[in-house]
Amino acid sequence: MDRHHHHDRIATELGLKPHQVKATATLLKEGATVPFIARYRKERTGALDEIQIATIRDRLEQLAELEKRRQSILASLHERQLLTDELRHKITQAAYLRELEDLFQPFRQKRRTRATTAREQGLEPLAKLLMKQQDINSLRAAKAFLDPAQGVNDVQTALQGACDIIAEDISNHAAARRELRHLFKTKAILISRVQKGKERGGERFRDYFEWEEPASHAPSHRILAIFRGEQEKILTVRIRPPEEEAISMLDRLFVHTHGETAQIIRDTIKDAYRRLLRPSLEHETRQELKQRADAQAIHIFANNLRELLMAPPLGQKRVMGVDPGFRTGCKLVCLDNQGKLLHHTVVYPHSHREAEAAKTVEQLCERYAIEAIAIGNGTAGRETERFFRTLNLSPNLQIVMVNESGASIYSASESAREEFPDHDLTVRGAVSIARRLMDPLAELVKIDPKSIGVGQYQHDVDQKALHRSLDDTVISCVNRVGVDVNTASKELLGYVSGLNRALAGYIVTYRNEHGPFRS
């Protein structure tokens, strides 16, 4: 399928006009970012918003992967001389990856199976004879295929080998897989049980020790929690539709009479389902559940990040930043209204030196005319906040708890080392906490979004998809707010549409050497 067909397909899926999708695809191919297209190319896209443009981008990539897989399958079949005109037509017309894989399933180069051995023993003609379900004596028919040299010493061995071939053929049948896949999708039950002897060590998964619910209704956080419990070997997880329905579905497809051979086929269907189809489709369903859970969780994580980035800035105020601690003390920094470091020290309010700490803080607030205090919300955060609220400070001075996730990551970063080469990590971390209060967006863009801590299961989801979504969110926020080219860091400038990290670095270097831009 050509790219124009893809444009039409995406337009239909999203309720857009083909020319809107085509224009967006062209702009993306030229290297334009999603916010840039949304803001500055409205006339070409028909005023598509960021969400629509990002969805088009993602679908184009998915369809490109579909085409890549289609060509790979065609090449493999052609090379092995298995590509008939009918099969080529079906593969060319396949609209979904699962449909492609079902068509390719019978031709996969597999590891050795029971059916492989049976075919090598010459039992495929017997399998085909049984599948016809004619009124024959199966034992008498099987005698014709005895071959001690091939290991077929009795009729039971011959019949079992033939049934193994039939079971594999049923498992590879595209229509059977399609109908069973729908059954798994609509009626499968997600079942979780605690592993024997793991009750004590797995208390945090207690809710899922005896859990069952329709897989299609399971929310993302529960799917991720259950799969994590399985990964940690606390839970055993199964995904099963009603077996009677699955068997009946296969019976309708493959059983056509009521004779002796029909009963053999019925018994073989049960083996094909339990041994081959159910494990395969359960694996597929797991993947689909994981993908759905990942997508839902990533959407929540992106919204959480957006709230952090778009939090109202305090503005140009003189701020004291506090990185709390018990044994190692609280690291204090005093910044001017531009975020420049003026002073740093350590106090110990959670020890016998509490009075000394109180005096130091009060003196620093007066000396540097501090207007707000930002306290990190990590270890000792609440205790430190209570201490500060007991001090004799100006009633107009704000005391604010600040999310400190990722501050330690920033303090060890190249950016922090460049700005504060003569200060240790604790000072840099406290500076980051203070600046997050002054301007959350400008400070948080210096940190990998994944390090900010945007959700409970962020390390369990697809990391590539998470990175893209969080990156998109940062880009969107930066371009919505805008930047001051004369004060913005290179990290902040790097997210501006039309710029990249290298250009942002050149701008900052030029600004440092030649002074502020005048226009």
Image (spheres, rainbow, N blue to C red):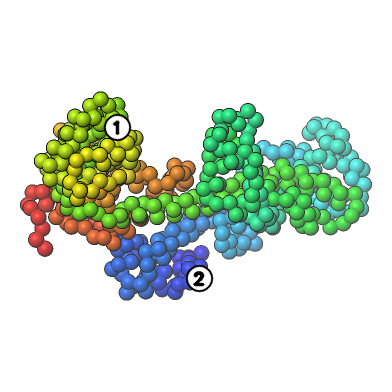
Q: Position of residue 478 (x, y in %)?
A: 28, 57
Examine the rendered structure and indicate whether residue 50 appears above or below residue 80: below
User: Mark 2 and mark 1: span between their CA atoms?
Assistant: 57 Å
- Crowd class of label 1 (few under 14; some 14 to 19; many from 20; radius 10 Å): many
The residue to which callout 1 is attached is 325
Residue located at (44% from left, 54% from top): 299
**Would residue 120 be seen by someone viewing this image from the given angle?**
no
Q: What quarter of the picture does the C terminus occupy?
A: bottom left
Question: Which quadrant of the figure has residue 47?
Answer: bottom left
Q: Is residue 4 left or right of residue 421?
A: right
Amino acid type, residue under disc 2 in the picture: Thr
Amino acid type, residue under disc 1 in the picture: Gly
Residue located at (89% from left, 55% from top): 258
Q: Position of residue 156 (x, y in %)?
A: 86, 37
Q: Which mark is residue 249?
A: none
Q: Nearer the viewer, residue 13 or 27?
A: 13
Regarding mark 1 in the picture, which secondary structure is present there? loop
Q: Position of residue 134 (x, y in %)?
A: 88, 54
Q: Nearer the viewer, residue 98 or 120?
A: 98
Q: Nearer the viewer, residue 378 or 294?
A: 378
Pick whichever of labels 2 and 1 is earlier in the sequence: 2
The residue to which callout 2 is attached is 12
Pair 2/1: label in front: 1
Residue located at (32% from left, 59% from top): 476
**Would residue 332 be seen by someone viewing this image from the given angle?**
yes
Q: Is residue 378 left or right of residue 229?
A: left
Q: Position of residue 28 (x, y in %)?
A: 35, 62
Examine the rendered structure and indicate whether residue 348 appears above or below residue 462: above
Residue located at (53% from left, 36% from top): 204
